[in-house]
Amino acid sequence: MTLDWTHKSYKIVDIRKLQNLYALRILSNSDYDSVPQPLFVKHNIFNQICESYFFKTNWTREDIINVYWNFYITKGYFIKIADGVVDKIEQDPSKWYISFLDIDGQLGTFKNY
């Protein structure tokens, strides 16, 4: 299975913490591109990316909304990769989930084979 970003170069325009998840609203530069809202991402995934990018644990809302992001978004499930094995973790079938995200740019790319 090959994975690549489903959505590239998006801004996070709103973020809320809900127990072990963050709820995000994102927006692209294109008026034609619509993304169902809200999107959910596990807090540990989001925190890890922010800490590695901003080099601090106390990042702010302004830090997050001032950069562009890449996302791997799916409906009703999220993807987990461990030791080269891809698992599909079923969730609420009516909600959209972010399995992977990173800051857009030269280092913000991935492909998993």
Image: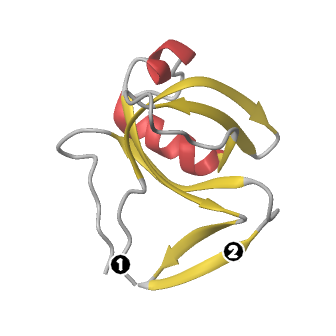
- As drawn, the label of residue 103 is none
Q: Amino acid at mark 1?
A: Thr
Q: Position of residue 16 (x, y in %)?
A: 72, 28
Compared with residue 37, is residue 81 higher up or lower down, i.e. above or below? below
Residue nearest the viewer, comparing 78 with 75: 75
When asked about the image quadrant of residue 97, the answer is bottom right
Label 1 sits on a secondary structure element that is: loop
The residue sitting at the left extreme is 106
Q: Quick one: quadrant of the N terminus?
A: bottom left
Side of 66 relative to 59 (left or right): left
The residue sitting at the top extreme is 62
User: Residue sitting at 21 percent across and 46 percent down?
Assistant: 107
Compared with residue 57, is residue 48 higher up or lower down, i.e. above or below? below
Q: Quick one: quadrant of the C terminus?
A: bottom left
Label 2 sits on a secondary structure element that is: strand
Q: How dense is the environment of label 2, judged by Cα within 10 Å: few (below 14), some, or many (20 and up)?
A: few
Q: Position of residue 9 (x, y in %)?
A: 34, 37
User: Residue sitting at 29 percent across and 61 percent down?
Assistant: 110
Q: How dense is the environment of label 1, judged by Cα within 10 Å: few (below 14), some, or many (20 and up)?
A: few
Residue nearest the viewer, comparing 103 with 44: 103
Q: Nearer the viewer, mark 2 or mark 1?
A: 1
Residue nearest the viewer, comparing 105 with 19: 105
When asked about the image quadrant of residue 61, the answer is top right
| Disc 2/disc 1 C-alpha distance (Å) | 17 Å
User: Residue sitting at 69 percent across and 74 percent down?
Assistant: 89
Q: Earlier in the sequence, mark 2 or mark 1?
A: 1
Q: Amino acid at mark 2?
A: Ile
Side of 11 relative to 8 (left or right): right
- As drawn, the label of residue 2 is 1
Q: Position of residue 42 (x, y in %)?
A: 66, 51
Residue on which the image places disc 2? 89
Q: Position of residue 37 (x, y in %)?
A: 68, 39
